[in-house]
Amino acid sequence: MTALELKVTKNIMNSLLVSDQFDSFLVEEAMITTFNTFHIDGHLVKDFYTGEELEELEREKKSVLFSYWSDIRPICFQLIKGKKTPVSFKVVLHAAPELIEKIAATPECQVAANLIRSLALNIRYDNGKVTCITGTAFTTFIMDKSVDNLWDAYIRRLLSGFGLDFEESD
């Protein structure tokens, strides 16, 4: 787990809410506090879909557990946009299954993809600061830290590639 504090709040807000840079991530939840607190549960409600629609999602290797950020982003943008900044927000993102498989396939990784439950990125805005916190979860206890290290390095490269300056946070 690594905590990275973003140096320019406006840049991460643009990357997260205006651009499609995070669209391939899955959303576990989003909580936005403005004049009210809005909570979005990113878990898909399977009863909403027909059997054919669920099969199509699975065929396309789409998540049948969480919504994609691309589907939730416009809603969050509507809640946040305006002249006043939100009091706070939190977005919990997960790597899509394809990214988990890609990371597990690297030579440095000593853990099979099917043992990785999730690779998470928590983005929190509070008191004028944005912090990104990485996390990993496994289906069983694992002592090996190669996945943690690879995920942390991936997020650092991703943020740098988006032109977002950050520093390690305590």
Image (cartoon, grey):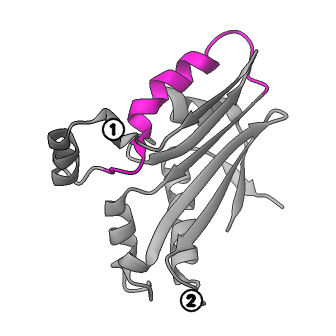
Residue 89 horizontal/vertical position (percent): 70, 34
Residue sitting at the far top: 83
Residue sitting at the far front: 47
Q: Is residue 139 left or right of residue 13?
A: left
Residue 27 horizontal/vertical position (percent): 49, 44
Quadrant of the image for the N terminus?
Answer: bottom right
Q: Are marks 2 and 1 in contact (CB under 8 Å)?
A: no
Mark toward the viewer: 2 or 1: 1
> Does 115 sit above or below residue 153?
below
Q: Quadrant of residue 33?
A: top right
Quadrant of the image for the C terminus?
Answer: bottom right
Q: Quadrant of residue 49?
A: top left
Secondary structure at badge 1 equals: helix
Please give the range of residues in magenta.
63-87
Q: Residues within 10 Å of mark 1 (few under 14, many from 20)?
A: few
* Mark 1 lies on residue: 47
Q: Residues within 10 Å of mark 2 (few under 14, many from 20)?
A: few
Q: Which numbered circle lies on residue 146?
A: none
Of label 2 and label 1, which has the lower sequence position?
Answer: 1
Say which amino acid is labelled 1: Asp
User: Observer-nearest residue: 125 or 75?
Assistant: 75
Q: Is residue 60 left or right of residue 28?
A: left
Q: Is residue 80 visible?
A: yes
Residue 92 horizontal/vertical position (percent): 59, 47
Q: Is residue 19 visible?
A: no
Give the Cα separation between the discs numbered 2 and 1: 38 Å
Q: Quadrant of residue 9?
A: top right
Give the residue at x 85% y 34%: 127
Q: Which numbered circle lies on residue 144?
A: 2
